[in-house]
Amino acid sequence: MEGCTILGALSVTTGVKDALSIVHGPNGCAHHNFSLLHATLATDTDSRFPHIVSTHLSEDDIIFGGEEALERAIREGLERDVGGIFILNTCIVDTIGDDTAAVCRKSWRVPVIYLPTAGFLGGGFSRGMLNALQTLAIHAKPREKVPRAVSLIGEKNLEYEVEENYTEISRLLESLGLHVYLRFVRDITIADLTEISRSGLNILREPELMPLGDLLRQRYGTPFVDRFPRGFIGTLTFLQDVARTLGIPCEDAVAYEMEHQTRVLAKFQDLEGIAVHLGRDTSNSFLREMVDLLGMFERNDGIHLPIPIPEPVGTGGVERLFHHWRRTICASL
Amino acid sequence: MRQIALYGKGGIGKSTTAANLSAAFAERGLKVLQIGCDPKHDSTRMLMHGANIPTVLDLVRERGVEPITPHEVVFLGFQDVRCVEAGGPEPGVGCAGRGIIATFQLLEKLEALEGDVVVYDVLGDVVCGGFAMPMREGYAEEVYLVTSGELMSLYAANNICKAIARLARHGRSKCRLGGVICNSANTHPREQELVEEFARRIGSALMGFIPRDRMVQLAELHKQTVFEYAPTSKQAQIYRTLAVSILENGSLTIPIPLETDQLETLALAYI
């Protein structure tokens, strides 16, 4: 079971800070998602309210059609200082056949962008997120590339450690002489969306976003690396992948990262020789690598270690996982 | 209280049949309520002498949350037949089916569903759940299919059979098929035989044959039912006979819908 497509899409559209997301449907559809996004964002350092409003559809709107209510909500939205508006369809308006796209096409003062997000049409949270990213990705024109500019594609705005992961990727890119140009889509403006064509490389959060990577490559000629780095070896491979894709050297960066990883490991020597248990799913090669690196060994009656979801990103993510494991181990001894 | 629903293809003459049946029931001293369940809201027009009465949904839309009283939606027509029009959205937007559901809920709340006979006049070729509302528990327990000998009209009638049969599978549903009314379109000489055979094949019977008569058109041009315009006419007598057949009808069945090819073969045999 997975969440609704509309939440996946909202996790993207609310990442555009000067935009308003209008959920076209009854109040509850907007409120439920607002609460969830708000609760998650509140754990971030800047606790802001997601810019979400509802078209407040009632039974009358369903009988007579909800397009008027949508136009009203757009007009009200324009009274705020917004750079753009996203319209997200709920199940009921797609059932009665509101022509949301036509309403969006009218001439509005700012871009009004329609996202087909009705949950009953299939797919879940991930599909909603991918669709939204794709919808937002096609508003740019091919332009000259900014030197050494890299964009992050599809950061999971609702995951823990999203900022920590960003810091880690930035650190790794800097070691190659590169920098993050655009976070697509997190903490950017409507105008920034058109900058997507200017990065020399895109890094996808995870391989599931490959269709989007392909789309950006076809439209704007931007190559991509298909995932954030995972584990110590994965981090070194990541540096090599990025460098190879851009045709730049990486030997120094890889050598430095290996030294850095050795220093990180040295901090956890106290965990060597401890018997641990990873639960039933022992096929996870990433976890196996981590346990081996620490010199721990697996045994059925070993200390039960928490399994991180999603897996930690880069060397920094592994270091945080090791701290977490140490706390668990200390509490059990 | 008898609750009767007339279903059939659009334009087949449901409203004319319904209005004249209501008038016939009223003539026999029965208290009649006719509810038009078609967004084009012209079911009761002849009973209302050509007036388009305000529809329930128009009122709901204008009022918002303010309460509505029964006399704002129920209007007295010819022979004191009480008339209601559900109404609906503009063509091409919204959800007419939900409109029917909302209308029924409101009429229920207003306790307007009363009398000796309630006649529901329902658009039959719209097949979403909302248009099946009159067949649900607590509403019409007998459905009469209005059809001509034209294939498309039989096809629509057959579809309604599917809906009744489906509902009947729910143990609690009391909705049954009362019979078939042939409203002649003068399609071919053996039209009556064809519709009679169709009725038999779906496990029902022909309740009446209404021949095409210019009296109906004349009455409508005068914004009246046949009963009012020409009460002693042959056509009025046909509606009277049909009304009696319905009132005395004791045979309610769960229909056996035909497959499309069966229906076509049947139509072909009588052409």
Image: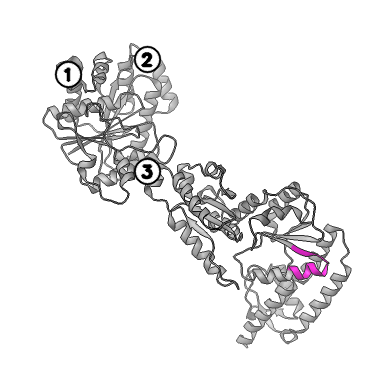
Quarter-of-image position of residue B81: top left
Task: Say which label, 2 or 3, has the lower sequence index.
Answer: 3
As helix, strand or loop, the secondary structure at mark 2 comes to loop
Task: Say which label, 2 or 1, has the lower sequence index.
Answer: 1
Under mark 2, the amino acid is Tyr
Say which mark, if any, is on residue B237.
1
Q: Residue B121, how many percent across, how many down?
A: 28, 32
Residue at image point 70% right, 72% down? A287
Rendering colour mode: one colour
Rounded to the nearest angstrom, the CA distance separating label 2 from label 3 is 39 Å
Residue B112 seen in the current view: no
Q: Nearer the viewer, residue A215 or B133?
A: A215
Under mark 1, the amino acid is Gln
Residue at image point 75% right, 85% down? A269
Rounded to the nearest angstrom, the CA distance separating label 2 from label 1 is 28 Å
Residue at image point 42% right, 28% down? B259
Question: On the rendered image, what quadrant is the C terminus of chain A found in?
Answer: bottom right
Q: Is residue B181 above or below residue B87?
A: above
Magenta segment: does it hold A172? yes
Q: Nearer the viewer, residue A283 or A159?
A: A159
Q: Are marks 2 and 1 on the same chain?
A: yes
Rounded to the nearest angstrom, the CA distance separating label 3 from label 1 is 38 Å
Under mark 3, the amino acid is Arg
Q: Residue B263, how many percent across, how many down?
A: 40, 24
Q: Which residue is mark 3?
A: B98
Q: Select label 2 or label 1 by which is in front.
A: 1
